[in-house]
Image (spheres, helix red, strand yellow):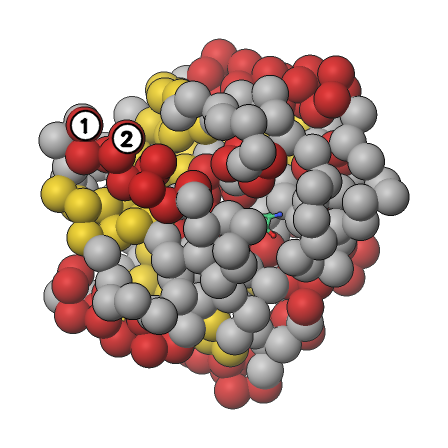
């Protein structure tokens, strides 16, 4: 069974601007955000059949809801994040403590090696794909590859609106992937084409609706509402698509995938 870590949006607001989606003048409607988050939680647990664990929200850390950035889980090991921006740095020890308390071995990258967790590191097929440029450093990929004894294919991001890999690249269970080509430099686009099976191009419109920021569990895909073309493409390939309106979270530059850190891949080989 797939399981995820989420954080209730009790203190979620736009308090600072660290990516081009964020504007303090476009404030979160808290009640609406809570309902959207609860709907995502309901779809994951009741429709998709996943388990969701929770980390306590903390006042003053509005982006803690985006648990995917807290680190990366590999079996019983947890590689903790090194956030690029000071505003998010205090989240890292909270995630590290959550995992340490549950018996995970917490691995820390050397100081100055930025790494924003699953936001910039995703397994696809038998490989890991790492994003870099805006948040994570390419040098962190090398260290992570050594720690996990696994090849990391480094992809250079090229559009500040798609500042994390999980905003423009989404692995699918058969070694396939969704991706938004203009978000990558040409050489990285070619790497995706070479190293994934039948990559599906997401349109500019759906990409800007965070279509690539989907949670995938087997053949089920949980995606922000309104990605009509993407939905059609996925359904034609035999996926069941669950739409959840996450418009309040787009205001901070995140959607479904950012809100749920995957805890376990155990029963779900990505190359099946
Ligand atoms: N406001 C957050 C930031 O800029 C959003 C994080 C979105 N998370 C993600 N995995 N893409 O850091």
What is the quadrant of residue 221 in the picture? top right
* SS of the residue under disc 2: helix
Residue 204 - label: none
**Whole-percent x and y of residue 174?**
38, 51
* Relative to 146, 261 lies left or right: right
Taking the spot 54% from the left edge, 15% from the top edge, the residue there is: 42
Hey, which residue is sitting farthest bottom in the picture? 187
Q: How many marks?
A: 2
**Whole-percent x and y of residue 270?**
31, 48
Taking the spot 18% from the left edge, 46% from the top edge, the residue there is: 106
Q: CA distance from mark 2 to mark 1?
A: 5 Å
Q: Give the labeled residue for mark 1.
A: 101
Above/below status of 182 relative to 103: below
* Relative to 5, 34 lies left or right: right
**Whole-percent x and y of residue 139?**
33, 77
Taking the spot 24% from the left edge, 67% from the top edge, the residue there is: 110
Q: Are marks 2 and 1 in contact (CB under 8 Å)?
A: yes
Q: Nearer the viewer, residue 186 or 101?
A: 101
Residue 98 - label: 2
What is the quadrant of residue 20 in the picture? bottom right
Taking the spot 77% from the left edge, 31% from the top edge, the residue there is: 28
Q: Residues within 10 Å of mark 1 (few under 14, many from 20)?
A: few
**Whole-percent x and y of residue 235?**
62, 39
Hey, which residue is sitting farthest right in the picture? 25
Above/below status of 105 relative to 192: above
* Relative to 151, 251 lies left or right: right
Q: Is mark 2 within 8 Å of ligand 1?
A: no
């Amino acid at each position: 069974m797939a399981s995820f870590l989420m954080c209730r949006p009790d203190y979620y607001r736009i308090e600072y601007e660290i990516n081009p989606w964020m504007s303090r003048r476009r404030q979160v409607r808290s009640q609406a955000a809570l309902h959207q988050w609860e709907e995502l939680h309901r779809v994951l647990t009741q429709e998709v059949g996943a388990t969701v664990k929770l980390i306590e929200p903390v006042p003053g850390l509005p982006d803690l809801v985006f648990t995917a950035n807290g680190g990366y889980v590999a079996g019983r090991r947890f590689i903790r994040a090194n956030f690029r921006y000071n505003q998010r740095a205090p989240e890292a020890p909270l995630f590290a403590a959550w995992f340490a308390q549950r018996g995970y071995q917490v691995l820390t990258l050397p100081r100055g090696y930025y790494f924003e967790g699953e936001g910039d590191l995703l397994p696809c097929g038998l490989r890991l794909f790492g994003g870099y440029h805006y948040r994570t450093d390419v040098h962190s990929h090398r260290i992570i590859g050594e720690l996990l004894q696994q090849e990391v294919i480094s992809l250079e991001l090229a559009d500040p609106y798609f500042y994390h890999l999980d905003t423009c690249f989404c692995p699918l269970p058969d070694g396939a992937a969704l991706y938004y080509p203009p978000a990558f430099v040409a050489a990285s686009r070619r790497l995706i084409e070479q190293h994934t099976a039948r990559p599906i191009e997401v349109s500019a419109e759906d990409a800007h609706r965070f279509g690539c920021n989907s949670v995938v569990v087997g053949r089920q895909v949980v995606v922000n509402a309104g990605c009509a073309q993407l939905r059609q493409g996925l359904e034609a390939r035999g996926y069941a698509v669950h739409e959840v309106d996450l418009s309040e979270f787009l205001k901070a530059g995140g959607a479904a995938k950012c809100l749920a850190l995957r805890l376990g891949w155990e029963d779900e080989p990505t190359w099946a």
